[in-house]
Amino acid sequence: MNRKSVLAVAVAAAAATFSAPLLAQTDEQAPGAALGTTGIDRARLTSGTQFNPQISVILDGVYYGASREVHGPAGFDDGHDHGHSHGDAHGLEEGFNLRETEITMTASIDNYLDGVVTLALEGSSGIEVEEAYLLTRTLPAGLQIKAGRFLSDIGYINRQHPHDWLFVDRPLVSELLFGDHGLQDNGLQLSWLAPTPFFSRFGVEVLQGEGGIASQVGEEDFTIVTYDGDTTGAPDRVRWRASNELEDRSGPQLYTAFAKVSPDLGFNHAAQFGVSGGYSNSFQAQEAHSSGRLETWQGDGWFAGVDAVYKYDAGRSFGHGNWVVQGEYFFREIEADYASRVFADGSTLVPSMAGGTDDVFRSRSRQDGLYVQAVYGFAPRWNAGLRAEAVGLTNKSLEANSNRSNFESFDASYRYAAQVSFAPTEFSRLRMQVNLNDYAHDDGDHAHDAWEVMLQYNVSLGSHGAHQF
């Protein structure tokens, strides 16, 4: 090979290397772009070999500051809320935070299966398995099975990892109804890519049930250890113990279903509309108080929601002129037996109020939430966005109001956000976001507004599969 040929090969290789990310940006505009010829959910898979899976590392750091201590929205802590929870900042402390280091390994195992493993190191607290699942490659008729631990396909943002978000933090409705990591569980998913002239995908999931609407506690002893004076005045150790009277339940306990359709809107426009829901045959929670009182909840629940996403590709470089508009709404209902009990003696729990009729009852909690956001590429590599959120438009919580033998209702809470992002390359992004929280308290007032500011860096080391639509 002469020098001219070598130079031509080198130029072609370099062009392929640098053009790949740009092409990937364009491909993401199509809802079905992440699909394989026989599979459905292959967006995160890259071309690892049998002995060398593709490995990527995402570094996600956030500087966080707030104008005052941020209290969580009243009514959203599954029975433990008194209007002052601290879960809304997604665990961020004021100052510098290494929020998450995500390590993803993907590979084709053989002709029949692909594999994905995503590990998350949250700060310095330890390693969590975010996802670890197998994916079939060759089922007929557009069918596909996913098995293992994975993010559910309900809604739109639930299956996204934090580095996929267009804002620094997860929308409140997703975090408060499904948990800090969304609906993430062990189980099985069966999905079907329907043979329609436009993208349409349907699926069902059978999940073990952990957290959120499928929280489990099981039967266990409630124990109090205290000290009392004996006849000599010396402290005498006393231990009281009784069953919490919750049932041991075996899984699976959570069943979900989803449908997503995307009409053909032409080359520059894409949209996806979804509907999803789920049913949990077991919801349990308990809270032990230092006073010796034990609160328990046991019942079942369901949820349903809709989501919509619209994307416009202006055809310019690096996202200039592009639009992304998305929104979701979810409603959740939990019907549960509630009991507030104390020890009558060393081994028996009885209702904490005399007579007990007001502290043991069955009722329904109903809560909902939504968000709408829009992001615009105002210059090459730059975008800016606005987001408005509301939770608790219906807000009958799991907090007991013993005077009425019912669950307590609270006002709605709101949050508004604005962000500006700069992506020097496909592999790095800097973002600034400002939030204004208008959260309701359990006393009904909204006098605790707080401003939050977040500065985020997000970089990718190594190859990373294309993002979902």
Image (cartoon, rainbow, N blue to C red):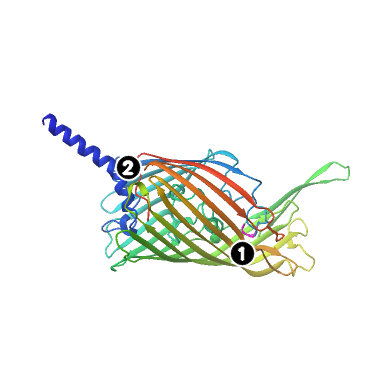
On the rendered structure, is 255 left or right of 47? Answer: right
The answer, for residue 50, to whether it is visible in the render is no
> How far across and how far down the image is residue 384, in percent?
46, 50
Q: From mark 1 to mark 2, how far is it between C-alphas?
A: 44 Å
Residue 383 shows which numbered tag?
Answer: none
- The kind of secondary structure element at disc 1 is strand
Res 257 visible: yes
In the rendering, at what x and y percent does residue 226 appear? 77, 47
Q: Is residue 350 above or below residue 128?
A: below
Tell me the quadrant of the picture where the C terminus can be found.
bottom left
- Specify the label residue 53 is tagged with: 2
Q: Which of 102 and 14 is in front in this view?
A: 14
Residue drawn at point x = 78 percent, y = 58 percent: 345
| Place of residue 11 in the rendered image (x, y in percent of width and height, measured from the top left) | 21, 36
* 230 lies above or below 256: above
Locate residue 331: give its quadrant: bottom right
Above or below, 418 relative to 365:
above
Task: Indicate left or right for 394 with 138 as reference.
Answer: right
Crowding at mark 1 (Cα within 10 Å: few <14, some 14-19, many 20+): many
Q: Where is residue 455 in the image (x, y as percent from the top left)?
A: 52, 42
Please tell me whether the stretch drawn in magenta is mainly helix, strand or loop. loop
Left or right: 371 in relation to 35: right
Residue beneath the point at 17% across and 32% down = 7
| Region rendered in magenta | 75-79
Residue closest to the eye, 273 or 113: 273
**Vertical side of 278 occupied by 106: above or below:** above
Q: Left of 308 or right of it: where is 281? A: right
Instruction: Provide the secondary structure element on which disc 2 rests.
Output: loop
Residue under numbered circle 1: 298
